[in-house]
């Protein structure tokens, strides 16, 4: 029986109180006999029974990826909707009833901003008694507290207050001088019983220490606590009440006397109670108060420690076994006055607790016991950690501690398993890195005194993130933040969004304004994101254009370049700048961003805009070629990143020459990368796109420094900021800038999805309506099983190498989807099996298929296990790391000239050492055959 799933409004399941203009619906279908949608119908009602229908599309051709409904929504209203799909075999499938609920929208607030004496350290609790006058039908709380807030309700005859909702760190992180989000909560059950609503406030991003561009400014946006709230009660007789924040609310003090995103929290339960005082009317904050865009940040997972370590230094340290971002629960029962200190860190050093790489972030929780048993949990901070050092508790136990993993409430849609345990661990590390850095803002790291929305990190990971999750709503909020900052900076995209202080910009980082919306569109198939961001995209390119002028001024300002690359000759050990010419990178990304604006304008039907920005792109591409390429097509920027950019954007008139130059650079570097933030995310994709998949696999599977599996073998559980964040002995290489949870280099997972698994979302079919399935097999993986629940539906691709040379491939295409399948190393004879539905429609080796499951097994057209001998070429032999090590015992392999790489080992030996004796040749053949 068919089923409709992932039915969403504005890419959110049952949104409550979100900004909902324009109104867009999407859905997926699975499990039906039909292969595609014939018609669909969306019905919207004000009740679950659909007896009060307020909008009906009728049965028509609707796009399941994105159907915009021109329907005038009203404030304070819950709407119910469903979609009914008719398939191509006349099945009729009806979705479960969904809802979306509007908030105040443009309605004026009756609630006023209130405050208290904010010079006191003890954090305030604002309270108001709620006494329903009649039988309650429904009740809503519209609320915002600055810096951060948590709302509680103590019902009549109840002993303990309950938290309202399950969110943390509300109202989230943005430029509060530009806009402020309020949240909406359904408090019908609480209002029915009556009781006291209380709101605890903390410092957060608004009022606490945050950012490093302006470190002297401790309370960046404001120095007083503020609260605004309205409780709307609808009674069963149709009448309504509104209880608004004003001077009638009371203020008392909590036992929290310090909170800070970087430094943690301090709570003292021995503090005496404080008498109530009336709230005061506060000065209205600068930013616009509007409905939320942020997805909820929730406790998504709970974890117990893997072990309790007693370190050589005599410390008690919990090891989670996994680095996370979040908070914790800890059961305590110590004598009154006991101070308990909890500190977090990412790594042990020589078996002992360590957190010096967190720089100034204290990352701790301090609790003074009142002598009773308590379960303590932080309210207004979070930590990036694997290890937890605890002092002040006798008889500490793993049962006492629970890690609470926090991240934004996105939907996971992608997963990959391979036959290589190290690669599987790398994939897990990348996924955990995303969880740790998808906490309202896509951050660079979750642990040190940073935790900020670096635009460069965000853009290089955005495609990878979109294979793993439905990122539309998450990035929608970040891109809104970005444009708000641009409006203050004449179109400039800051290096950090939100900025929190004076800022600069850079190519690649600022180009996030164009790259991220395009990726969101590519993976969602919803052009609404381009409509929302086209002015931001144009503003960024226009900003560059003004600086560039007629004298290439964009080349001449500061750029990060290939940040943290390893190829700058003579650089200090902790150098951050790569060798690739920053001006070259800047010029290329200028052209690419202009090109992206032109593509977006084309999608939106903005022909004049398309022409304008296409002309900018064409002019800039010519400038790049004139400045950095010879007349024969030779690239003057001879670095791995320089050549990767030349190949990606087809800048050379002689791509074969560029490919050979790239192969030589890899060869000279012993088949290892030395790229940074620019080159690394592109590296494997571009190699495969230019027929060098073997090189991409060698980079992926390299277990030595520098490489992805090097850190896996050293015990990493997330992705490192630096290729050498730890040395081979597990010691931290530097403390000035060294995070062990930095997902940028995890962008290689895009290549694993797109090429190793072969699930390729193309620009020709955004949202995956037509997916290119073209897996690349490799013995180093053995097998791959990939699942990607695209905007269209769930695609699956798997392959496995059986025996010496047999390949099996399985493909699943979802309802409404099509695939163009290219089988790896398939002989021509395979396609002659017309009994196999995979081969019903084949042209030029491409199998065109509709929804269904497909499988094929065949002998590969070339050997999958390479056999080595003395007659193998030097390039073949030296590409194998173990053979390279073996041969280095006999010759100076690093001194072999380029011309010799095409020669056999026999010929090279003959040229440099004379004829090889038959018995020596036989021994070499036997040795090489064992690899």
Image (cartoon, rainbow, N blue to C red):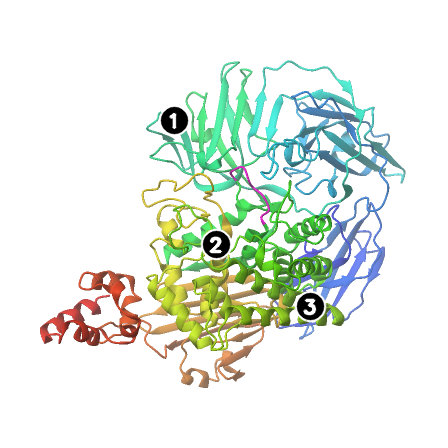
Q: Nearer the viewer, mark 3 or mark 2?
A: 3
The quarter of the picture where residue 104 lies is top right
Number of disc labels: 3
Residue 636 point in image, percent of width and height: 46, 68
Q: Name the residue rendered at 79%, 45% in the picture.
A: 103
Q: Earlier in the sequence, mark 3 or mark 1?
A: 1
Q: Residues within 10 Å of mark 1 (few under 14, many from 20)?
A: some
* Cβ atoms under marks 2 and 1 closer than 8 Å: no
Q: Earlier in the sequence, mark 3 or mark 2?
A: 3
Q: Earlier in the sequence, mark 2 or mark 1?
A: 1
In this rendering, does residue 816 appear at all? no
Q: Nearer the viewer, mark 2 or mark 1?
A: 2
For the stretch drawn in magenta, what is the main secondary structure?
loop
The quarter of the picture where residue 660 lies is bottom left
**Range covered by the magenta-colored residues:** 447-454
Q: Which mark is residue 746?
A: 2
To which residue does mark 1 refer? 315
To which residue does mark 3 refer? 613
Q: Nearer the viewer, mark 3 or mark 1?
A: 3
Q: Residues within 10 Å of mark 2 (few under 14, many from 20)?
A: many
Residue 185 point in image, percent of width and height: 73, 39
Residue 457 shown left or right of residue 63 in the figure = left
Q: Is residue 104 above or below residue 331?
A: below
């Amino acid at each position: 029986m068919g089923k409709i799933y992932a039915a969403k409004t504005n890419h959110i399941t049952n949104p409550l109180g979100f900004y909902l203009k324009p109104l867009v619906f999407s859905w997926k279908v699975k499990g039906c006999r039909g292969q595609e949608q014939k018609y669909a119908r969306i019905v919207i009602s004000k009740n679950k029974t659909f007896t009060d229908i307020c909008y009906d599309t009728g049965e028509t051709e609707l796009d399941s990826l994105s159907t915009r409904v021109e329907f005038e929504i009203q404030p304070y209203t819950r709407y119910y909707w469903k979609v009914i799909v008719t398939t191509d075999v006349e099945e009729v499938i009806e979705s479960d009833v969904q809802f979306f609920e509007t908030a105040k929208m443009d309605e004026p607030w009756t609630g006023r901003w209130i405050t208290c004496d904010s010079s006191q350290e003890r954090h305030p609790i604002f309270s108001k008694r709620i006494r329903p006058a009649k039988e309650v039908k429904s009740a809503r709380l519209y609320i915002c507290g600055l810096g951060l807030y948590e709302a509680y309700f103590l019902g009549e005859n109840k002993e303990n207050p309950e938290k309202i909702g399950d969110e943390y760190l509300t109202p989230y992180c943005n430029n509060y001088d530009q806009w402020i989000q309020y949240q909406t909560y359904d408090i019908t059950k609480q209002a029915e019983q009556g009781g006291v609503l209380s709101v605890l406030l903390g410092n957060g991003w608004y009022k606490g220490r945050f950012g490093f561009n302006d470190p002297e400014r401790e309370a960046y946006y404001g120095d007083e606590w503020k609260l605004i709230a309205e409780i709307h009660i609808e009674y069963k007789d149709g009448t309504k009440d509104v209880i608004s924040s004003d001077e009638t609310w009371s203020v008392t003090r909590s036992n929290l006397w310090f909170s800070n995103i970087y430094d943690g929290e301090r709570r003292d339960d021995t503090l005496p109670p404080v008498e109530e005082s009336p709230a005061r009317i506060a000065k209205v904050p600068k930013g616009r108060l509007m409905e939320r865009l942020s997805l909820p940040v929730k406790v998504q997972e709970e974890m117990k420690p893997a072990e309790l370590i007693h370190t050589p230094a005599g410390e008690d340290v919990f090891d989670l076994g996994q680095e996370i971002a979040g908070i914790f629960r800890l059961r305590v029962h110590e004598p009154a006055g006991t101070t308990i200190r909890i500190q977090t860190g990412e790594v042990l050093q020589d078996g002992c607790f360590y957190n010096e790489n967190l720089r100034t972030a204290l990352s701790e929780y301090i609790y003074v016991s009142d002598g009773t048993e308590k379960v303590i949990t932080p309210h207004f901070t979070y930590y990036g950690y694997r290890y937890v050092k605890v002092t002040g508790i006798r008889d500490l136990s793993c049962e006492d501690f629970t890690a609470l993993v926090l991240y934004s409430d996105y939907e996971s849609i992608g997963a990959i398993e391979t036959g290589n345990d190290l690669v599987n661990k790398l994939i897990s590390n990348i996924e955990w890195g995303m969880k740790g850095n998808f906490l309202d803002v896509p951050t660079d790291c979750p642990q040190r005194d940073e935790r900020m929305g670096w635009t460069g990190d965000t853009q290089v990971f955005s495609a990878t993130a979109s294979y793993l999750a439905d990122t539309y709503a998450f990035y929608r909020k970040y891109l809104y933040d970005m444009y708000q900052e641009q409006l203050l900076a004449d179109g400039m995209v800051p290096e950090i969004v939100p900025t929190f202080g004076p800022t600069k910009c850079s190519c690649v980082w600022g180009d996030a304004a164009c790259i991220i919306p395009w990726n969101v569109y590519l993976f969602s198939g919803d052009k609404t994101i381009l409509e929302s961001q086209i002015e931001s995209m144009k503003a960024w390119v226009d900003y560059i254009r003004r600086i560039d002028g007629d004298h290439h001024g964009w080349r001449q300002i500061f750029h990060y370049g290939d940040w943290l690359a390893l190829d700058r000759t003579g650089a200090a050990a902790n150098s951050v700048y790569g060798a690739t010419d920053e001006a070259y990178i800047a010029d290329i990304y200028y052209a690419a961003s202009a090109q992206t604006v032109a593509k977006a304008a084309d999608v939106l039907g903005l022909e004049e805009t398309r022409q304008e920005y296409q002309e900018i792109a064409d002019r800039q591409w010519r400038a790049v070629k004139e400045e950095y390429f010879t007349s024969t097509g030779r690239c003057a920027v001879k670095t791995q990143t320089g050549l990767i950019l030349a190949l990606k954007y087809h800048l050379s008139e002689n791509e074969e020459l560029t490919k050979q130059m790239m192969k030589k650079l890899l060869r000279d570097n012993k088949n290892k990368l030395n790229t940074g933030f620019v080159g690394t995310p592109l590296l494997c994709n571009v190699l495969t796109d230019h027929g060098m998949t073997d090189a991409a696999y060698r980079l992926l599977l390299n277990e030595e420094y520098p490489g992805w599996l090097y850190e896996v073998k050293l015990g990493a559980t997330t992705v490192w900021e630096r290729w050498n964040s730890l040395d081979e002995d597990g010691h931290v290489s530097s403390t000035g800038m060294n995070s062990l949870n930095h997902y940028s280099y995890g962008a290689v997972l895009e290549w694993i999805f797109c090429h190793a698994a072969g699930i390729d979302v193309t620009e020709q079919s955004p949202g995956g309506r037509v997916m290119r399935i073209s897996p690349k097999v490799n013995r180093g993986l053995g097998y791959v099983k990939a699942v990607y629940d695209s905007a269209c539906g769930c695609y699956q691709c798997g392959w496995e190498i059986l025996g010496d040379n047999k390949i099996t491939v399985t493909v699943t295409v979802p309802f409404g989807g099509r695939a163009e399948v290219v089988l790896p190393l398939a002989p021509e004879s395979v396609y002659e099996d017309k009994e196999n539905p995979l081969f019903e429609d084949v042209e030029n080796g491409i199998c065109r298929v509709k929804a269904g499951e497909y499988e094929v097994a065949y002998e590969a057209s070339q050997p999958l296990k390479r056999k080595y001998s003395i007659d193998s070429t030097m390039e073949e032999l030296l590409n194998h790391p173990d053979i390279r090590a073996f041969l280095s015992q006999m010759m100076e392999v690093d001194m072999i000239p380029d011309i010799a790489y095409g020669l056999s080992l026999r010929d090279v030996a003959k040229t440099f050492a004379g004829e090889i004796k038959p018995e020596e040749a036989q021994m070499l053949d036997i040795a090489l055959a064992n690899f």
